[in-house]
Image: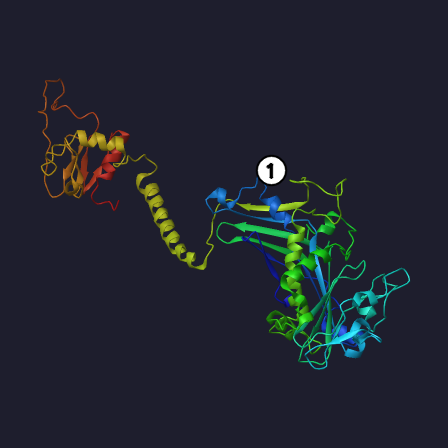
């Protein structure tokens, strides 16, 4: 099946990969054509995504955030209801006798010249004047493949005429057929005795939609999605009854420039070009598609797909010309079309396989956070907790701490490098309910104010209690009673037996 064959690709603006789709393959496989026509017929049709979707997606008027606007982490996908430019390549193997009506040098009374190659004849320079002029009653010679290529009065199409036969591994091109919509190639492989005649035509397929996706990590990609009756954005859903296989008569002029750039007509001079050799080696010798290499029709479709992309730039996304004037001057006009868009403006998962290793880190961090949450709920019971590292708390602790011998002299100019690695801890004086900084490993005491005594009526009246704390010791555990919220927070954090 053609669906299992590698699709053709193209490049748009050097940054977007375009992938085509093989369509209209029902009944057109070489095995089926061999039964139908009694000869090897290689018929393929390639649909390419419409490049106008890219221009619409990147146009500022549509306000679509690009990955470059999101530091390269965003992405989106657009599914557009648009026609797909399509090319059909039809190649048929023909015996020399069957091909004679289409080759001028094989005609009776033809004016020919000889060459240095034995048994080769070429047409005289003005051979085109010997071809009958096209008219409503002149459809040129009939052939055994008229129904294959749809030539003759019943089809309204005329066959091509080639000036000569190509040598092995060579191609000859014809684009001069009157009112034709096709480009023709005549090829010869040395693997078989027959010649191969190929026809290239183009039209706009309504059986597709265009999908465009762009990502800051994976780049941009366009593809043609075709012949799915359940596709909600298929062009046929937007324009029911749109015609199919309505060939473009103007495309052959673009194809003519394409073949000139590749010099596919090198067989006229027996150039034996390497490209022609590769193409002719892909000619089917049996009525089946090879599994390891493309057929000649597939290769030609992939080669000519660039004309579909180039010819569709700044063209309508519909199958007809929807403007009043025959042409539109730059910068053109805006056109609306149906589309759906899916956007992702952040990344919540890994994009490369090696990034999945970070899930281990995420799990560990999650468990630690869960453990901390359980501690706060069970140990603190919802009470507030003061952070020692808060700048305001650090300032209060520092200004109420005794001088440090190690940091002596650093108040004027700030601490030096050796001072920054000095270990310290938070000390606590129970009698004064006072916290302060102390160098680790040293016992520092604050100067306590003398207690004040007074006489009272009640027995046991003595020292004035601290207004903020009254501590009791019970089995090594500090029991809090009457503490203010801040003092309770400090007292909780100073507990040496707590893992926190």
The colour style of the image is: rainbow
Q: Residue furthest right?
A: 137
Task: Answer left or right for 345 relative to 252.
Answer: left
**Residue 287 at least partly seen:** yes
Quarter of the image for the C terminus: give it.
Answer: top left
Viewer-nearest residue: 201 or 378: 201
Local SS, label 1: helix
Q: Nearer the viewer, residue 50 or 485?
A: 50
Q: Residue at x 30, y 36 (%)?
A: 385
Neighbours of disc 1 within 10 Å: few (<14), some (14-19), many (20+) = few
Residue 49 can be seen, yes or no: no
Residue 456: image quadrant is top left
**Rendering quarter of residue 58:** top right
Q: Is residue 357 left or right of residue 176?
A: left
| Tally of numbered tags | 1
Residue where numbered disc 1 is placed:
61
Q: Provide residue 85's location: percent of width, then percent of height.
A: 69, 55
Residue closer to the observer: 143 or 445: 143
What quarter of the picture does the N terminus occupy? bottom right
Residue 483 vertical placement versus 458 (above, below): below
* Residue 175 drawn at (x, y percent): 74, 62
Q: Position of residue 272 (x, y in %)?
A: 63, 73
Q: Position of residue 129 (x, y in %)?
A: 82, 65
Image quadrant assignment for residue 462: top left
């Amino acid at each position: 099946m053609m669906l299992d064959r590698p699709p053709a690709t193209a490049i748009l603006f050097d940054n977007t990969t375009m992938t085509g789709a093989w369509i209209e393959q029902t009944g057109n496989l070489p095995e089926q054509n061999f039964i139908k026509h009694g000869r090897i017929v290689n018929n393929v049709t390639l649909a390419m995504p419409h490049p106008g979707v890219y221009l619409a997606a990147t146009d500022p008027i549509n306000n679509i955030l690009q990955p470059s606007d999101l530091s390269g982490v965003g992405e989106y996908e657009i599914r557009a209801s648009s026609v797909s430019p399509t090319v059909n390549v039809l190649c048929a193997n023909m015996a020399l006798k069957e091909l004679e009506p289409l080759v001028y040098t094989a005609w009776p009374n033809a004016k020919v010249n000889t060459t240095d190659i034995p048994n080769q004849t070429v047409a005289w320079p003005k051979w085109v004047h010997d071809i009958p002029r096209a008219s409503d009653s002149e459809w040129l010679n009939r052939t055994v493949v008229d129904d294959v290529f749809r030539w003759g009065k019943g089809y309204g199409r005329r066959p091509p005429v080639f000036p000569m036969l190509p040598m092995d591994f060579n191609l000859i091109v014809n684009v001069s057929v009157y009112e034709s919509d096709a480009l023709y190639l005549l090829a010869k492989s040395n693997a078989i005795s027959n010649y191969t005649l190929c026809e290239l035509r183009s039209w706009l397929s309504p059986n597709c939609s265009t999908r465009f996706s762009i990502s800051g990590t994976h780049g941009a990609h366009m593809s043609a999605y075709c012949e799915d009756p359940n596709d909600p954005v298929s062009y046929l859903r937007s324009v029911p009854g749109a015609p199919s296989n309505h060939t473009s008569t103007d495309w052959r002029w673009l194809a003519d420039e394409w073949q000139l750039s590749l010099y596919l007509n090198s067989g006229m001079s027996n150039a034996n070009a390497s490209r022609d050799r590769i193409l002719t080696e892909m000619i089917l010798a049996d009525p089946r598609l090879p599994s390891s290499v493309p057929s000649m029709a597939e290769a030609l479709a992939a080669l000519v797909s660039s004309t579909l992309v180039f010819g569709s730039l700044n063209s309508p996304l519909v199958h007809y010309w929807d403007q009043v004037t025959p042409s539109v001057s730059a910068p053109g006009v805006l056109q609306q079309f149906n589309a759906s868009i899916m956007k992702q403006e952040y990344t919540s998962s890994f994009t490369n396989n090696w990034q999945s290793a970070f899930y281990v880190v995420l799990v560990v961090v999650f468990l630690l956070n869960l453990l901390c949450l359980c501690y706060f709920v069970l140990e603190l019971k919802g009470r507030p907790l003061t952070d020692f590292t808060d700048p305001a708390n650090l300032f209060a602790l520092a200004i109420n701490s005794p001088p440090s011998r190690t940091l002596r002299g650093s108040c004027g100019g700030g601490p030096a490098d050796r001072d920054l690695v000095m270990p310290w801890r938070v000390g606590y004086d129970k009698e004064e309910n006072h916290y302060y900084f102390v160098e680790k490993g040293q016992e520092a005491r604050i100067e306590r104010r003398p207690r004040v005594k007074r006489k009272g009526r009640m027995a046991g009246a003595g020292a004035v209690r601290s207004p903020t704390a009254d501590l009791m010791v019970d089995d090594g555990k500090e029991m809090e009673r009457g503490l203010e919220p801040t003092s309770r927070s400090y007292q909780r954090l100073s507990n040496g037996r707590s893992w926190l």
